[in-house]
Amino acid sequence: MADAGEKRIMILGTGGISHRHAEHFTSIPGCRIVAACDVNADRSRTFADMHAIPRSFDNLGKALEWGEFDAVVNSTPDGVHKATTLDILAAGKAVFCEKPLAVNADDAFDMVEAVEKAGVINMVNLTYRNAHAIQMARRLIDAGEIGAVRHVEASYLQSWLTGRHWGDWRVDERWLWRLSSAHGSMGVLGDIGIHIVDFVTYGTGLDIAALQARLKTFDKAEGGAIGGYTLDANDSCAMTVEFTNGALGVIHMSRFATGKANDLDLTIHGELGALKIWSNTTESSLQVCLGADIETQTWRPYDCPPTPRNADRFVIALLSGTNGEPDFRRAAEVQKILDLCFVSDAERRMLPVELPPAD
Ligand SMILES: NC(=O)c1ccc[n+]([C@@H]2O[C@H](COP(=O)([O-])OP(=O)(O)OC[C@H]3O[C@@H](n4cnc5c(N)ncnc54)[C@H](O)[C@@H]3O)[C@@H](O)[C@H]2O)c1
């Protein structure tokens, strides 16, 4: 039984990432997971049993009809986020949506409009905001420690297409859908591009004013398909960007980065100093080159005390009634950058970034 005032959460989509959500939300005071829901009834029931969740549904409509929850963690596949989230918002529930918010910026901004009209708490799980090092880096930048940013290097590199350390993508549907645009995948851009673009722009505190991108889809199977999956989604992306303050940057990402498991690297060079941030799913670190050290290019480790995770901030938002970051609008703005990468690649040119104004 939930305590009065405790926020009741349902987890929608009980696949791979949902187990992490179950662990996080179970550990946060002020909330309780009251239901699980997945179109695969067995998976939903097994998940509910595993995490001691009292109710299990095989259909979102039935769960909404029951309705005894305040918020939904939407961890369905990318292509399912929009339709399910709009139904959840119509029922007046708050949403913590997995990234990417949708499969394109138009859909993402439709979701922004719906959520802002509904006036409910909304956040998107741009996971690497959880990295203590990126939070500390942003504080140092806001405090003027490295002066004006002039140059940025960033990458997000994985290698699940060249190894079997996360399972065999050739036979596992959990990986195959990520390789097929017909299954709602935006390729490496949707998978991890959204994280690194958020990491760079949040970390530097700068928006991207213009970009150029090259995308690559490598041959991976005979005839370019496995079963019903056409392997047409991009695997690697290299971008050059100009920030609103005139700084230049390079951002690249790949699933073919043999030797890298899941690494985000970001170096921010300012006029007075530089910051080097590294993160994976569970750990992060910060090195700094500041003050007199810029003359000798000496880098020193910098202590980063723990900061709240997205899930913590979502519960704080539910309890306080004040929305948390990153919200739907922020995720839609990042999504716009990803959409422009497709256009830039097709047209082989630099494009300006123009975002719809917030009302
Ligand atoms: N933030 C991160 O770092 C991170 C990491 C991994 C995955 N993700 C995101 O999380 C989402 C899920 O990824 P995953 O790897 O867990 O996928 P998955 O395929 O393992 O799980 C998705 C689950 O959703 C269920 N589902 C599909 N349609 C549904 C519907 N209409 N209603 C209810 N359930 C439905 C499927 O049956 C499946 O069990 C994706 O959007 C992915 O991009 C985010």
Image (tube, rainbow, N blue to C red):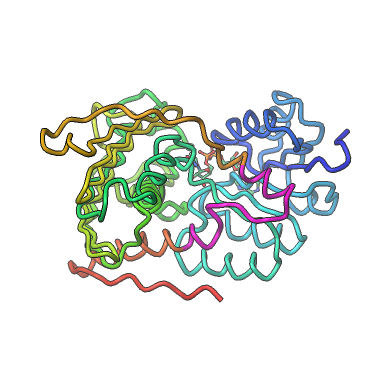
All told, the count of numbered labels is: 0
Of the 4 image quadrants, the one containing the C terminus is bottom right
The part of the image, by quadrant, that contains residue 10 is top right
Query: What's the residue at 64%, 68% (across, down)?
Result: 116
* Residue 211 image offset from top left, x and y in percent: 25, 63
- Return the residue nearer the eye: 33 or 81: 33
Q: Which residue is farthest left?
A: 296
Q: On the picture, is 264 further left or further right than 307?
A: left
User: Would you place residue 183 above or below residue 312 in this image?
Assistant: below
At 47% from the left edge and 54% from the top edge, which residue is drawn?
Answer: 184
Residue 279: say if magenta: no
- The secondary structure that most of the magenta stretch takes on is helix
Residue 252 percent across, percent down from the top left: 25, 47
Asked whether 322 falls inside the magenta stretch, the response is yes
Q: Give the range drawn in magenta.
A: 313-332
Instruction: Tell which residue pokes out farthest to the front in this image.
Output: 292
Q: Which residue is drawn at 84% across and 43% down?
A: 5
Q: Position of residue 125 (x, y in %)?
A: 53, 46
**Quadrant of the image containing the N terminus:** top right
Residue 223 seen in the figure: no
Say if 2 sits above or below 90 in the image: above
x, y percent for residue 264: 33, 37
User: Visible in this render: residue 63?
Assistant: yes
Q: Which of 165 and 112 is in front in this view?
A: 112
Task: Name the side, left or right, on which 14 lies relative to 295.
Answer: right
Instruction: Using the image as rendered, state which of residue 53 and residue 134 is in the foreground.
Output: 134
Ligand 1 sits in which quadrant? top right
